[in-house]
Amino acid sequence: METLVFGLLNGVSYGLLLFMLSSGLTLIFSMMGVLNFAHASFYMLGAYFAFTLSGISSFWIALFIAPVLVGLVGAVVERYGLRKVHANGHVAELLFTFGLAYLIEEVVKIVYGKTAVDYKIPDLLNFAAFQVYGASFPAYRLFIIVIAVGMLIGLWYLLKRTRAGLIIQAALTHPHMVGHLGHNVPLIFMMVFGIGCALAGLAGVMAGNIFVTDPAMAVQMGPIVFVVVVVGGIGSLEGAFVASLVIGLLQNLAVGINASFADIFGFIGLSELSEVGRISISSLAPVLPFLLLVLILIFRPQGLMGEKEL
Amino acid sequence: MTDTTVQDLAPSSAQKFRQRTLPFLILAAILVAIPMTGPSRTFYTIAHQMGINVVFALSYNMILGKGGLLSFGHAVYFGLGGYLAVHAMGWIEEEAGLWGAFPVFFLPIVGFAGGALAGAIIGWPSTRKAGTTFAMISLGVAELIFAAAFMFDSFFGGEQGISGDRMNGTQMFGLSLGPIDDVYWFIAFWMFVGILGMWAFTRTPLGRLSEATRDNAQRVQFIGYNPQKVRYLVFIFAGGFAGLAGGMAAVNYEIFTPDALSLVPSGFVLIMAYVGGIAYFVGPIMGAILLTYMQSMLSDFTEAWLLYLGMLFIVIVMFAPRGLAGIVFGFLDGFRSDDRGAFLKSWFTTLAGGFLMLIGLIILVEVSVRWSNGYGEVYEPFGMHLSHTNPLTWILFLVATVAGIALTYFANRDKEGAA
Amino acid sequence: MSTYALSLKDLNKSFGPAKIITDVNLDIEKGERHAIIGPNGAGKSTLFNLISGLYTPTSGSVKLHGEEIAGMAPHLINHRGLSRSFQVSNIFINMTVRENVRCGVLNAMGQGYSWWRNIGSNKEVQSRTYEILERCGLVDKAALPASLLPYADQRALEIAITIAGGADVILLDEPTAGMSHSETDRAVQLIRTATEGKTLIIVEHDMGVIFDLADRISVLVYGEIIACDTPENIRGDAKVREAYLGDEEEPDVKEMV
Amino acid sequence: MTFRKTAILAAATSVMAMSAAYADTVKMAFIDPLSGPMGPSGEAAYTSFILAAEHINANGGVNGNEIEVTGYDNKINPKESLVQLQKAIDDGARYIFQGNGSSVAAALIEAVNKHNARNPGEEVIFFNYAAVTPAFTNELCSFWHFRFDAHADMKMAAITDWIAKRDDIKSVYLIGQDYVFGQAVASAAEEQLKEKRPDIEIVGNELHPLAKVKDFTPYIQKIISSGADAVITGNWGADMQLLMKAAAENGSDVPYLTFYGGSKGAVSSLGEGGVGLLYQVTEGITNLDADDEQYALIEEYKERFPDYDYYYHRAFNAMEMFVKAAEEAGSVDPIPVAKAMEGLTIDHAYGQATMRAEDHQMQQPLFISTVSDDVKYGVDNIELGWALVEGGTIDMASAEQPTTCEMERPE
């Protein structure tokens, strides 16, 4: 029972964090067709910027400024890098972001050093929110949930209630039509890329202090973000939301299952001693998203809620 | 109509010799000549790695350049082929079954079989789609296989991997494969076979069809081919040749570890092929040679070598999407053109500009790295004392960078003016 | 009992609520030259896409030589002897003209996927490629990259690729679109010789071309065939006049009426 | 700042200037990651070897020869390590240091064995300072390999010894990375606990995939709900840091006995939360009582390399042992040095250390320490540091483990 409660709580908070990261990538991918490999690098930049800003001011200022800074970096990258590569097609764009990920990591290493920086949870939130079954649920995780929901509402408002949002929505479904309507497509692209990166930056601000803020954090987070976006379905923020939660819950709940393959498939004669039989569900938890990715791509290429195939 | 008229359409035999036979004769001559120069052990070690990477990068280009499929998991086939070869090396040592008579020299064939088999199994679901879907599946599969490598110790040997001893079994060509110069002939032989094989593949109907499918999968369907089948078959071959490279690596290093299957080598082979130039057959060869050299030697000079690697890659993607081979062939074309003078002027101005910007970049990076480390070490090229507090550092950096940008700008403005 | 080369029965295609093709019935004899005309947006290209396998019909049947092919993958339909061209030139721009044609020829020779042969060494493939190039007037341009061909030659190459596989039912989608008069005349000549002895189905706007080539004409309006007859009878058909007169901007109407 | 660096430089140049007086140079190669994510691990050790070599050279070198340690970046990749090994051998190095990654160490042991068999007269010795897989000094043991770190079973013996003394610990939770090393740690813990304290219940034996988990919270909650009184883990790298962060964050308050709690950044990332939570087992910690010479060394290291802390005490042990062996052998050639090293004992700052002849495994006392705010030397540039726990000194004999090694020696 307690594993279930904690699995749910943690799954939701981790899932919402994933959504913060992947919503930006979904926006970028579905509008521009760019599978931004450096997306997790912007997440890392968010964490590092927040570290610097909370050092010279406070966490609360960093919470607002750091994502904006990351967004600006993203806009500059789009304007002076990606746009130039655009003419050479999507593969070139993808490779550009692939190289960018290398570059950002190395620059971060030079500026901040190769080891982890001491980016801390603000004292104001560093307490246990409540206790269940002897384990405490940290207040900061609740705060993540609050911020993520706030971001969700903000994003929803932006997309459904503002003119810019309507254009973006139109561009999501009919990328070629928006230009005909007389909108400045390059400018929209730059904005979308900037906003997408800022969302990743926000995730970095939120996650950098519960995880570790070091130059390897981008590489660790990178693949899972793709999984979310692809599993959710291209062009579907709702899909990304569902996929984030599914993956968050899947990973957290699977950890609680101690059964091994031998327990499950024992009836077909799988032995406890064989290599396959020894594998337990909980030890598989971190690879489950990739299994999900491959299965989804083979059996439902449009993703959980997407309309078009990749 | 007679045969002679038919033949007229094809290139003449002189052309064929110049374009097809001669390069391979030159390659063979170089490979034979290298040991005569009495190279050092380090040279051999790096040359072997280059040989392996050349085959690996070419196999990658079978799917990326010729097939139009971007994969983030090509090292899976290299690794699985290599693992099978290492296991076979063990069977040779134990003289299990008929293996006792199998020469280690021919282990790359086992690697080829392993890679092709893995390609046949994994390629079946993944090549049904092209484009981004394929890229994403390859990423997912690579993660899964890599994770599995740590679960199935009997095949992958866990973190320590599986090792073997190449000095067993039947000797071929009088090579014991013990000393490094014996191994050289092994690598040279298989690199030659690999290059020849993959070049020949481009000359087969399937090879041509693969290019047609890359350019226009829809049209291919309407002249009666199944693009999925084309992709699948090409994928198996690419896996096979990657496995061949894996087999070469198995004999060269006598060990295989799960790292060989990870995303890192998969990303590296992508960079090698792309930097070299995926539109040309020789592109990946050039890329493999340059990047292997960078990986093994540049890291001796600077710890920021990954930064330079990332820069090189981005510069190629942004400014020279046809890669090093594109630059070389572009130069040759321009050199042969009527307007040679103007071309050379513009080309060398760009080169000089690029070189100056590189100097500026190196100063910036090297000084920053040392400042960031905080050991008080100072960058001292050519006896200059370039610390981050020395104004000379920043003057040099600014002058080089600004002059470089200006030169490149003028060179390109001239070019546009001429056009 | 003789079967039709191509037989459409109650063919329907809708995209969501929009019905593009409605109850189309059409039988085409072996060796017939059949033209499909109709105003823009009538569904001519959709009809081609349904026959050639790009789209799956919503309902109805498509029979090629009596065999059901509706919903089959394009390459399988091609194997059964049907080949089509495209309205927009759809060729392999990175290959030479000769290689373009050879791709089609190889399939007919059953060597499509072979990886153990040198592509240049098969005499039969070479001579057949030469034959097709000659028939389409492309021999002197054989070594040129396809991307460098002038427009009219690209259209000729499009036809060459289409017939290279040796299919006996050929679908040509506006083969003369965008050509000058002299180029059109040459193209008609080319189509005539290239499809000799084969069943030809052609979509065209140029009425001159159609009356020159076709044995029979079908008129497609709003996804329905409103008339199907010999050129002479179509010329006098009241329904056809009506359908076309409603669309005054159709440039070929005057010429036709 | 600038002044200090210049002063160090001046010192470094003066050492350089003296080099003319040496008879010859003994080249040693340090093959470990010096770039990439694992770069800091390698660099922390590399700097220790550099400093140790400088001290030896300042005292007249080894048998009148100067020691030169050169770094070779293996990117923690076994294959790249073999390339770097060839380069090192070509550059004239006959002694190799390596420690990061058992896979790399295994590859190097194999490669060195083969090289020495295939190139007699050009032998190379491998000094392993941190790769702890027990097999290297058991079934895989080699005359050409010496290990200066306690291997996993020895460290586990120290941990279980300490647990055995603690009657309040009734249940233990094992968590580790799902691969050979993690599995070996878990089974060693199970076996040794059963032997030393059969009453202790192992309430969990969890293996998670290597370097894939981003959030350890669910694992921690499993640990908390199991009611374990102590946790044992062999985790390293990000898996170690993330595990401990999640433990502190979720209010787990039992001792976490680790092999690699001392890795850089672990203490600072936990902050005060690490006190009484994070434990480690090592061959020495800076806050043990020692002589002034050792304190001076610790301070010099910190001043020279402010990014790192004095952690690799065994690097200094290894160098000291090498010098002593070379002096006894009267040579700096690999085979005589290796033979002299067998059974050799040195007195170092925190006790004695002996290189056991049968398997080339260093035997030394081990120490269990925990994070404390009351220490002489902090780590990660904060006030917190490592302090010995009560009953935390495990003497050489208790840590000693039997070996199955059957060494083949050159004549």
Image (spheres, rainbow, N blue to C red):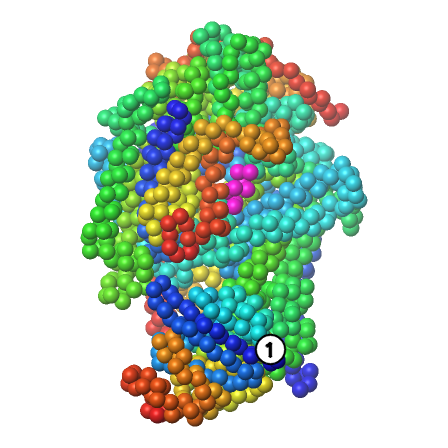
- The residue at which mark 1 appears reads as C166
Query: Along the line of sight, which residue is nearer the eye, C148 or A53?
Result: C148
Whether residue B187 is visible:
no
| Quadrant of the drawing holding the N terminus of chain B | bottom right
Query: Along the line of sight, which residue is nearer the eye, B399 or D380?
Result: D380
Query: Percent x, y for residue D77?
Result: 55, 38
Query: Percent x, y for residue D197?
Result: 54, 9
* Quadrant in the rendering for residue A118: top left
* Quadrant in the rendering for residue C4: bottom right
At a point 79% along the width and 43% down the height, the residue shown is B98
Q: In this view, does D162 lie to the left or right of A194?
A: right
Residue D397 inside the magenta-drawn segment: no
> Crowding near pointer 1: few (<14 within 10 Å), some, many (20+)?
many
At a point 39% along the width and 77% down the height, the residue shown is C224
Query: Along the line of sight, which residue is nearer the eye, D323 or A57?
Result: A57
At a point 43% along the width and 11% down the height, the residue shown is D389
At a point 73% along the width and 39% down the height, the residue shown is B91
Outermost residue to the left: A162
Q: Majority secondary structure of the magenta segment?
A: helix
| Quadrant of the drawing holding the C terminus of chain B | bottom left
Count of marks placed on residues: 1
Whether residue A7 is visible:
yes
Query: Percent x, y for residue C253?
Result: 34, 88
Tag 1, which secondary structure?
A: loop
Query: Along the line of sight, which residue is nearer the eye, B296 or B396?
Result: B296
Magenta segment: B141-148
Chain bearing mark 1: C
Q: In this view, does C17 lie to the left or right of B254?
A: left
The relative height of residue B262 versus residue D164 in the rendered view (above or below) is below
User: What amino acid is found at the position of numbered circle 1 in the picture?
Assistant: Gly
Query: Percent x, y for residue D51?
Result: 48, 26
The relative height of residue A56 versus residue B79 in the rendered view (above or below) is above
